[in-house]
Amino acid sequence: MRDLTIGQYYPGQSLLHKTDPRVKIILTLVFIFIIFFCKNFFSLGLMVAALLAGVLLSRVPLKMMLKSMRAITFIIIITALLNLFYSTGGKVLVSFKFFKITDTGVYTAIFVAVRIMALIVGSTLLTYTTTPTMLTDAIERLLKPLKLFHVPVHTLAMMMTLALRFIPTLMEEIDKIMNAQKARGADLESGGLMQRAKALVPILIPLFVSSFRRAYELAFAMECRCYTGGEGRTRMKQMKLKGLDSVLIVGCAVLLGGVIALNIFFKAFNVG
Amino acid sequence: MPIIRLENVTHNYGDGTPLCVSAIKNINIEIEEGELVGIIGHTGSGKSTLIQHLNGLLSPTQGRVWIDGEDIWQNKKNIRSVRFKVGLCFQYPEYQLFEETVFKDIAFGPKNMKLSEEEIKQRVLEAAEFVGLTPELLEKSPFDLSGGEKRRAAIAGVMAMKPKILVLDEPTAGLDPRGKESILKLILRYKEATGATVLLVTHNMEDVARIATKILVMNRAQVLMYDTVKNVFAHSEELEKIGLTVPQITRVCRELKKRGLDLDESIYTVEDACAALLPLLKKGVG
Amino acid sequence: MERIIEYQDVTFRYEGDDENHVLPLTINGITLNIEKGSFAAVLGRNGSGKSTLAKLTNAIHLPEDGRVLVEGLDTSEEKNVELIRRKVGMVFQNPDNQIVATIVEDDVAFGPENLGIEPDEIRRRVDDALKAVGMYEFRLAEPHKLSGGQKQRVAIAGILAMQTDCIVLDEPTAMLDPIGRREVLATVQRLNRERGITVLMITHFMEEAVQADRVIVLDHGKVFLDGCPRDVFTNTQAIERCGLTVPQATALTRALADSGISIRTDVLTEEECVEAVLKACGKE
């Protein structure tokens, strides 16, 4: 369990690592939007090409990228199959009993699969090149305007940071408690659903007790370090937009234009 | 026949990956019944990996573990029964308490052993007596006990399984001298009453020196020494070289010997040092 | 000498579960001054009130009676609390429960950020603090991958970066292994000597208290012994009466003296003990 990493980060010094995390978050959102905007293989192809360029730029090995895909292979396959069987229209390629596979179905299936993969790679690129701390910081700064509507932006960001900080600690703790109870003969592996749920009690109670104790001590420690909430705080790490960031923003705008153009130009080839 | 026998035991973490490390490597050791073995070594030397092999919480990557003449991994399904034979009490065991009452918590182990109600009750009362918890305390919530009482309740939870081998990881961590003393005493009491073999993992050399019959020194995933307390402390300089602290009194006697006093080099208690020095000093004065 | 912390006839008790159940006093009338630049160790059994004494210094606890003053500021006045916490930093027992950020340097920056310091200045302070505790090369590490001793040093750096005058450590080594204990003690000693930071360290390790300038022994919420380590630890009887132990070197010379040997009994360290025994032998 200890190997579990949340928001996997791939340490590096590439241009994408150095990009302002706020820009990265916005561009990722824009990227997702544009992907959904693609209507045919030409515009989607442009996006995939842009994505590959991004991956190369990040210097994260392609293997790592594929790894992120493994967890959702199942979802991709299911979605593709659904599209394959449920699309109507076009030439029938194969048919037996209720099932009909048409050429439109094949195109749509491939199109959807590529689209999902592009989405995953795009967002993984963000988490691979940005540390969790940078991400929470950036989110806090981006959401700042919401303060006007009394949304506790700073508190939410602080909660996220603390969660990220304590996940590994709690994982370790679960390991320890499990071992301690197993040493007293606790059976965690056999029995029906109810029995297994019951077997979790000796693990969950100590875990809750210790989490509360930790939270209590942590609150004291934070108060002792003069923490009084977001008001009047400064940050050591500043975020400033640099030339690099503007280049990326312009690049993204060009992509959007390209996709629109291709969508119109190859209208005849639109999928779905 | 030794009660614990490890034959060529190796345990690797992250086996098959480039990050593979051996937490213990080629461990061969035989521990006789009735010993009180102090296990020492600094953090990361493999101590905790070693003890988790004794009750089957970890299985060896290579080699075999024999407890009471049986290869514990012979029948994988039976591994849980090994845990009743080898009681393992982890560091800060009070954090594993969870039941409504101290009684029920101590009864958790015996219950898992599927003993009769009658037998469970008897076991709990007996274990509570070993650790010096009064019957009134047994009806309290474990979370209402004091720190020292919690620790003792948790140890009782392991003792209630009446293990033939009792393994404790740093049972005195975080306690003051008197608290330490009382924990060590109750461990001795259990050992005397049941004839169990006891393994005590600790950083505190002075505790080990006082109560152990033998010492096992771990260093870099391997057993560096396994010998009587006297023989191990005779190598005090070697122990210091691998970053372990020996009792202050051992260092004092070592220095005195270097400076020309005729002293045994393996003194490890103040009483022994005093007894050894008295004749020398009386002679010196006379 | 200038005082940094003053306890004036302080009492304190914890709240019971209900009104009918009043707990006994944990701190039972303590009057004590801690001098600026000193290194004082507070020793005592579990439950002697030593941790509570630490928590009274920066208004985590407020006295029931009496006053606690930090550089003249009363801790029970609300408006003083933040000022006091800028002067007295606190390091706790459990290293895991005081580190806030997922990266070492961000954690050290946490205090100064709360104080509203300029970013460049924070960066300077963080680097300086990490160097002072010998953790600079770990500045980008994740805290949960550090050893206990390293985590405690990061916690100390977090206080240093706030530029407090005084560090109060509440059993900082209780959960560490011997190597971690040595690291933390050496760090604290160095900061006291080189930077003149006042140190108030709560501990139950007699070996650590021996290294201080002054040892205060608490028993049942009262000051039981107070003096330089030599005076305190050679008072073998008193130390043992309150459930503590003396260094083995001290115990040895005391035992020899009790057996009728004429030997110096005020030894504290190994070297002194060796010299004393040799002298008693007539070898010197």
Image (tube, coloured by chain):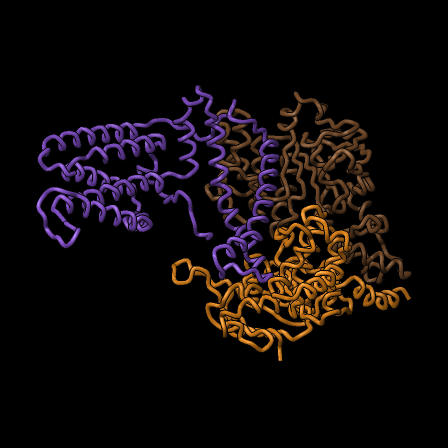
Chain colours: A purple, B orange, C brown
The quarter of the rendered structure image containing the N terminus of chain C is: top right
Q: Quadrant of residue C213?
A: top right
Answer left or right for B241 relative to A90: right
Does residue C240 appear to the left or right of C50 in the view shown? right
Image location (x, y in percent) of residue A140 = 43, 29
Residue C119: tell me if it is visible.
no
> Residue A269, how many percent across, how many down?
10, 37
Q: Picture coordinates of residue A260 (x, y %)?
A: 16, 29
Above or below — where is A182 with respect to C130? below
Outermost residue on the bottom side: it is B1
The mark total stands at 0
Looking at the image, residue A106 lies above or below residue B170: above
Residue C45 shown left or right of residue A55 in the figure? right
Which residue corresponds to the image point at 66% horizontal and 48% vertical from the top-left?
Answer: C174
Residue A255 in sight from this viewpoint: yes
B269 over C32 or under it: above or below? below
Q: Residue furthest top?
A: A148
Asked where in the image residue B170 lies, by quadrant, the reply is bottom right
- Residue C168 lies, with reference to residue C254, above or below; the image says above
Q: Residue at the far front: name it.
A: A97
- The quadrant of the picture occupied by the C terminus of chain C is bottom right
The residue that appears at 8% across and 46% down in the rendered structure is A91
Q: Position of residue B119 (x, y in %)?
A: 69, 66
Task: Give the camera-side residue of A181 and C148.
Answer: A181
Observer-nearest residue: B238 or C13?
A: C13
Residue at (59% x, 41% y) in the render: A212
